[in-house]
Amino acid sequence: MTTNEGVDKTSSPEKKKQNRRGKGEGSIFQRKDGSWTATINLGSDTNGKRVRKTVYGATKKLVTDKLTRLQNQKLDGTYVDSGKMTVCDLLDRWLEDSAKLNTAPNTHTRYESVVRIHLKPAIGTIKLAQLKPMHVQSMLATMERDGVGERSRGHCYAVLRRALNVGMKWGLLIRNVCEAVDPPKQHRSEVRPLTAEQARTILELSKKTRWHAVFALAITTGLRQGELFALAWDDINLDCGVLSVRHSLEEVSGKLRLKEPKSKSGRRQVTLPAGAIDALWQHKAIQLTEGLATCPMVFCDTEGNLLRKSNFERRVWKKFRDSAEIPKTTTFHDLRHTSATMLLGAGVHPKVVQERLGHSSIQLTMDTYSHVLPSMQQDAATKFDRILEAKSG
């Protein structure tokens, strides 16, 4: 007489069939050493080759959890496999296939420099899939200990973050680890405008020279140096007293080229004061005596060639700066700050100053020239007193 005692019902063919996983759902096995492993089919790659992922764990539950996560990622499309790709590989591809096409040449050169000098030596050999926030945080901390400035550290963080964002778009990453890293604190550099007396001295010294108009426009319009050197006579209407900023001059790999402003706010019209208009008429006459009557550029060298910033700084700006006994730390760009500070100090509305400078927002203008705010606040309080006194009288 037979009985069912001692029979392992779980080993029956019917039970095994019920426990069998469906196609693509993965399979779990126990290895000879007692550990567990699971394998799942994740579809095919771009070459049609089947992609399988294997995970390991000390217990069946641990492996089952890993397998479940993979299944969920497969279903919602968040699974990515960057394979053996390193951070260095991604940075090279990003520089060539994305940054080079979507940024100005000078910007791309700066990105390449940051990648080559800082990012590759620090984290380039790490596999992309294994990059963690602590790697980035450690890199920034090491740079600070080595004396790398906050601006350079900020550039490193920004460049890596941008590259990883593109990596996410390409499906190589699930998240950007930079989002979990404290970015380097950036302290705005101190603005060092000239005093009114120093500005007058520069203008006086440059009179009757071929450079007077450069200084007159820099101080009265606040144009950037590249914008000044890109000005063509077609951009200026002396009869109406208006100039249009349409281009900026930049140097890339030793070659000069004109480029359009990066933003809509950079492309603007600036009304000229009488002193600047007179300086431009004088400059036109000087060009005529130099045989440059047909030169399309407002500012050029004696041969009619575009001006290089480095040559101008060395041969012109330093000479006038020293003659005016202005501190050697003062740059030509500080004339732009001088223009803005003078206007704000005179009570010109910040919105007008923003438009003249070509800032993207009024907040940027106010943040940059916050040193002028205390005097503006005092002036506002004084005017308020006068209003009340006039009413009471």
Image: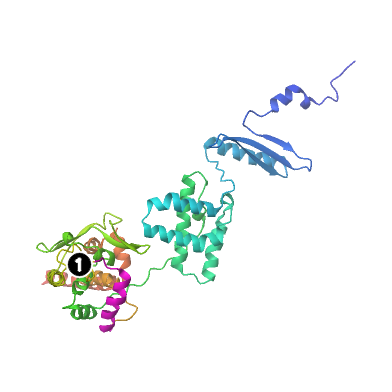
Image-based side of 279 in relation to 150, left or right: left
Residue for point 22% across, 58% down? 268
Amino acid beneath label 1: Val
The C terminus - image quarter:
bottom left
Q: Position of residue 207 (x, y in %)?
A: 17, 78
Mark yes or no: residue 156 visible. Answer: no
Instruction: Identify the residue under disc 1.
Output: 348
Foreground pick, 281 / 177? 281
For image coordinates 35% across by 72% down, the residue present is 190
Residue that sits furthest to the right in the current view: 1
Question: How far across and down, in percent of the image, does residue 136 sit?
Answer: 54, 59
Could you say whether the residue bearing mark 1 is in a helix, strand or loop? loop
Q: Which residues are magenta?
A: 305-325
**Drawn side of residue 275 relative to residue 148, left or right:** left
Which quarter of the figure has residue 319?
bottom left
From where the camera sits, is residue 341 visible? yes
Q: Residue at x 55, y 36 (%)?
A: 47
Question: Can you say which quadrant of the picture contains the N terminus?
Answer: top right
Examine the structure image and report whether residue 316 is included in the region drawn in magenta.
yes
In the picture as drawn, the residue positioned furthest to the left comes out as 239
Q: For this rendering, which residue is in front, 365 or 246?
A: 246
How far from the left and from the top, in percent, is residue 145? 54, 70
The colouring scheme, among rainbow, by chain, secondary structure or one colour, is rainbow
Q: Nearer the viewer, residue 71 or 40?
A: 40
Q: Main secondary structure of the magenta part?
A: helix
Expressed as whole percent of the image width and height from the top left, the position of residue 162 reads: 45, 54
Q: Determine whether, in the image, residue 164 is placed left or right of residue 359.
A: right
Which one is in front, 34 or 256?
256
Give the answer, above or below, for where 362 lies relative to 1. Answer: below
Among the 4 quarters of the image, the one containing residue 33: top right
